[in-house]
Image (tube, rainbow, N blue to C red):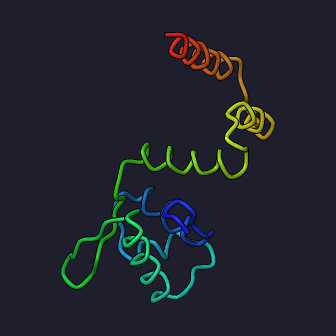
Amino acid sequence: MTSMELGKRERQIVEAVFRLKEASVADVLKELDSPPSYSTVRAMLGMLVQKKLLKQRQDGKRYLYRPASKVEKTSRSALKNVLATFFSGQPDSVVAALLDVSDDVTPETLDRMQKLIDAARKETQQ
């Protein structure tokens, strides 16, 4: 299992830490639906530190956890994994799926997407 192949609970914990920017075990527990025990969350946070997704620092007797990298870098890495795993590496399949599951695709959103496509097309032609 690579660092970006996370189980559901690990993903929830990482997402909680990213939302909070920095969090203790107790902070993370408050963010989770049907949370496991304190010791389970503490152990999972430790594993996420070992996977280099989170960093920790000591604050008195407790540890505080924060993202090991910027959200953009982590989300790109996760998206690459999703692209390879679920869409055979085909970006157009991802766009089709996003459009299919999005309830609020506005003309402005489509315009922004078209500009991104045009810029990517221009870059590949250089």
| Residue 109, image quadrant | top right
| Residue 103, image quadrant | top right
Position of residue 66 relative to residue 78, above or below, is below
Task: State the residue at coordinates (81%, 36%).
Answer: 100
Name the foreground residue: 97 vs 28. 97
Tell me where residue 105 appears, x and y as whole percent: 73, 28
Name the foreground residue: 54 vs 30. 54
Name the foreground residue: 2 vs 68. 2
The answer to whether residue 69 is left or right of residue 77 is: left
Task: State the residue at coordinates (57%, 84%).
Answer: 36
Q: Quadrant of the N terminus?
A: bottom right
- Report the residue that reaches farthest toward the front: 126
Position of residue 54 relative to residue 71, above or below, is below
The answer to whether residue 9 is left or right of residue 107 is: left
| Residue 91, image quadrant | top right
Task: State the residue at coordinates (65%, 44%).
Answer: 83
Position of residue 72 relative to residue 36, above or below, is above
Q: How many marks?
A: 0
Tell me where residue 19 appears, x and y as whole percent: 45, 56
Name the foreground residue: 22 vs 50. 50
- Report the residue that reaches farthest toward the right: 100
Tell me where residue 117 appears, x and y as whole percent: 61, 18
Tell me where residue 116 appears, x and y as whole percent: 57, 19
Task: State the residue at coordinates (54%, 70%).
Answer: 10
The answer to whether residue 126 is left or right of residue 116 is: left
